[in-house]
Amino acid sequence: MPLPDDSPRTQSALHPRNRHQGRYDFAALVSCVPELTAFLKVLPDQSPTIDFSDPAAVRLLNQALLAHHYGIRDWCLPPGFLCPPVPGRADYLHGLADLLAEQDGKVPRGPDVRILDIGVGASCIYPLLGHAEFGWHFAGSDIEPAALANAAAVLRANGLEHAITLRHQLQRGKIFDGVIMPGEHFTATMCNPPFHASAAEAARGSRRKWRNLGINDSTRPGSTAPTLNFGGQTSELWCTGGEASFIKRMIRESRDLGAQVTWFSCLVSRSEHIDAIAQQLKKLGAEAVRIVPMGQGSKQSRFVAWSFLETNHRTAVGG
């Protein structure tokens, strides 16, 4: 059963509203984060760039992007935590906004739109971008106390505790249980799931990224395993069964909460998982299913969204 594709975009293009079209304005970014200067390199056409294989450079680039485009101050990330590519994360939010606009033809804005971010991470990236772009209010859950502590520090530095709250998922293996409270309603949920099925698979993925960057990690001093330029803790990168298993669990849990969430959604990195996801949603009685393509350069991705509510009950207000 193929999923419907309501997006007019090509899969290789960023969303038209995405602020990160074209090349980075490094002059503006350096003005926000002067430390980025030390990591700039010059391409053959004399335009500036950074070494995207260097985790420190990528973290500073993210800090500058968040400061310049979204007014986020003092964003930081402890070493080893997942450092998300801001343009791609923004695309998910814009695609979700278009989905929420289905009901009355315009993107809903403001604090009445309540979004739950599953696996908010130390970066708190989706809530920060979503609040800055649309004024939405967020709850973010995570199983890692260190991730929540760092996210809380970023929120305090920006005075965003009123708009973004954090929740500790105490039950490993659970996704919504213990996070969505009885009687609570969310406009949508979103999630960047752990993609890999094991630590070994995650390491192989890291090596592929290194090769794509034209770098042999074995030549780096003291290197015993590939380092991800975007980092990542165990719970961020892999879980038993990988992405497919995680999304299946998410769908099963979502069925019991179908009256409390207008749209559930989740990134799907591998297109071969789509048919199985569609079959499970059909079996569990989802009233609506959408797949929204996203792209960043040559990389293609998508998110799947589903609702157990009938059309006239799908409100963009979280309640």
Image: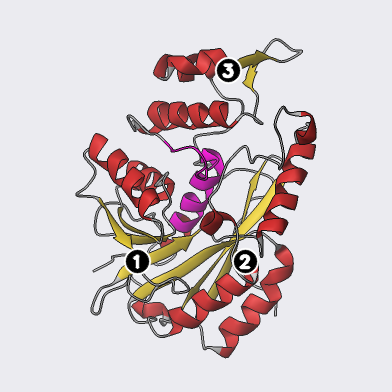
Element marked by disc 1: strand
> Which residue is at the front of the view, 238 or 62?
238
Residue for badge 3: 39
Provide residue 288's location: percent of width, then percent of height.
51, 77
The residue type indicated by label 3 comes to Phe
Residue 243's label in the rendered image is 2
Question: Is residue 89 found inside the magenta-colored segment of the image?
Answer: yes
Residue 187's label in the rendered image is 1
Looking at the rendered image, the quarter that the N terminus falls into is: bottom right
Q: CA distance from mark 1 to mark 3?
A: 40 Å
Question: Is residue 225 found inside the magenta-colored segment of the image?
Answer: no
Q: CA distance from mark 1 to mark 2?
A: 24 Å
Provide residue 189's location: percent of width, then percent of height.
41, 65
* Mark positioned earlier in the residue sequence (3 or 2): 3
Report the span colored magenta: 77-97
Q: Tell me if label 1 and label 3 are in contact, CB under 8 Å.
A: no
